[in-house]
């Protein structure tokens, strides 16, 4: 969560909050994607970590992200950066 918050310049409270500003939603989406992909967390667990959201909300967040993964969208570049920091913590 710390890596995502730092990359998107949001606090954990903002990440877990209900504000729908683009930056917050993108940060939540990336957190959910990385949690599902690399931590193999359940949708329910991810939802709880993101302020008690329902599992179906997390599924919708991830569905919207799939459109950006295959192209070099700025959000994809952020995902790669966070993933590399997570997988290689000694390179920070």
Image (cartoon, rainbow, N blue to C red):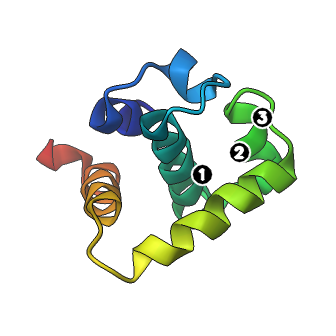
Q: Position of residue 54 (x, y in %)?
A: 86, 43
Indicate whether 54 appears above or below 30.
above
Callout 2 touching callout 1 (CB < 8 Å): yes
| Front residue of 18 and 52 | 18
For this view, does 49 lie left or right of residue 52? Answer: left
Labelled disc at residue 32: 1
Q: Position of residue 59 (x, y in %)?
A: 75, 61
Give the mark nearer the N terminus: 2 vs 1: 1
Residue under the image location 40 percent in, 24 percent down: 10
Q: Position of residue 55 (x, y in %)?
A: 84, 50
Q: Residues within 10 Å of mark 1 (few under 14, many from 20)?
A: many
Please name the residue that numbered disc 3 is placed on. 48
Callout 3 touching callout 1 (CB < 8 Å): no
Please name the residue that numbered disc 2 is placed on. 46
Q: Image quarter for residue 71?
A: bottom left
SS class, disc 3: helix
The quarter of the rendered structure image containing the C terminus is: top left
Indicate whether 64 appears above or below 89.
below
Callout 3 touching callout 2 (CB < 8 Å): yes
SS class, disc 2: helix
Give the mark nearer the N terminus: 3 vs 1: 1
Q: Residues within 10 Å of mark 3 (few under 14, many from 20)?
A: some
SS class, disc 1: helix
Residue under the image location 26 percent in, 50 percent down: 85
- Which residue lies most toward the left here? 91
Indicate whether 12 appears above or below 33.
above
- Which residue lies most toward the front here? 21
Tally the marks.
3
Residue under the image location 40 percent in, 39 percent down: 4
Q: CA distance from mark 2 to mark 1?
A: 6 Å
Residue under the image location 18 percent in, 46 percent down: 90
């Amino acid at each position: 969560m710390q890596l995502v918050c730092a990359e998107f310049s949001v606090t954990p409270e903002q990440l877990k909050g209900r504000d729908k500003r683009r930056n917050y939603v993108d940060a939540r989406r990336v957190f959910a994607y990385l949690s599902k992909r690399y931590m193999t967390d359940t949708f329910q667990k991810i939802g709880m970590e993101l302020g008690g959201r329902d599992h179906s909300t997390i599924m919708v967040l991830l569905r919207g992200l799939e459109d950006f993964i295959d192209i070099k969208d700025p959000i994809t570049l952020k995902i790669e950066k966070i993933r590399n920091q997570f997988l290689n913590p000694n390179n920070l």
